[in-house]
Amino acid sequence: MAIENWLGSLAQQDHTHVDGDLEALGGLTHPFLTDQCAVNQIQCLSGHLGALKRVVRRQVISYSLYIRQLDRILDAGPRSVCGAGCPRPPVGCCNADHYVMFSSLDLMSAQRSPLALHMGHVIGTLQRLESAHSLKQGQKLRPGPGYCQCLAEDGCTMRLFKSPRCAHYLCGTIRQAMQDQQEADVAPFLAAMSDTIGSPVTSTLGFMNPEVISAAADIYGSLLA
Ligand code: SF4
Ligand code: SF4
């Protein structure tokens, strides 16, 4: 599997904190991931990021666990529209470098914490590693007028470290399709996704929103690990 392959390729700098990180993060609920998946991800990233400040390292790992769950949720339904049903062909919303961690809204916020900046910087470094690994594994970039630099012919070159903007964006067509196709009430999920993308990142917690995951559990219960 591509994600495990990349995680396994990460240089292991320092294993000192792996046990502590597993204890702190492994016990948290990741309803859309199996325990084995979460444990492996925590171990690989903890060993790779071992030299970082604990709070930043753990938030970065938490972010990756969160994005992996969200990726799974979107793959299970919402992204089915992105092929033939996309209203903005040929590359839909990957028409600019949305991987950049801080949006203009974030940059205008005077309250952004130094830790959030540090976390964004670390994620930016991991994005480059993840994207480069995908290309090495055979994905081919899809260069084009203004297209995102991380866009390949078959989609994004990242799975774990998409930016909050990429991870939470749902266009109007997808929103409508979810409302039309899902029997469950999708409004809380759609609201949580919009709230997250619409709020400036002022702290390390601003990159992710647990309400997205809990609302998704009401719609995609069959995916729960
Ligand atoms: S989210 Fe919407 S605009 Fe973006 S690729 Fe999917 S269908 Fe197209
Ligand atoms: S990072 Fe990935 S999802 Fe985001 S715009 Fe680029 S190709 Fe699209």
Image (tube, helix red, strand yellow):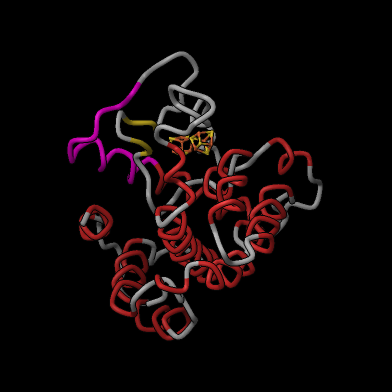
Residue located at (19% from left, 37% from top): 136
Q: Quadrant of the N terminus?
A: bottom left
Q: Is residue 37 above or below residue 116?
A: below
Viewer-proximal residue among 134 and 218: 218
Q: Is residue 129 above or below residue 150?
A: below
Of all residues, the one furthest to the right in this rendering is 110
Q: Quadrant of the C terminus?
A: bottom left
Image mark count: 0
- The picture places residue 143, in percent across and down from the top left corner, at 36, 19
Magenta includes 214? no
Viewer-proximal residue among 183 and 123: 183
- The picture places residue 199, in percent across and down from the top left corner, at 74, 51
* Left or right, residue 221 beside residue 196: left
To which quarter of the image does residue 22 belong? Answer: bottom left
* Left or right, residue 186 beside residue 56: right
- The picture places residue 176, in percent across and down from the top left corner, at 62, 45
* Left or right, residue 120 beside residue 147: right
Q: Which residues are magenta?
A: 128-142
Magenta includes 141? yes
Q: Is residue 121 above or below residue 66?
A: above
Residue located at (55% from left, 66% from top): 216
- The picture places residue 161, in percent across and down from the top left corner, at 44, 51
Of all residues, the one furthest to the top in this rendering is 145
Residue located at (58% from left, 50% from top): 168
Viewer-proximal residue among 164 and 184: 184
Residue located at (68% from left, 60% from top): 187
* Left or right, residue 204 beside residue 28: right
Viewer-proximal residue among 102 and 195: 195
Prevailing secondary structure of the magenta residues: helix
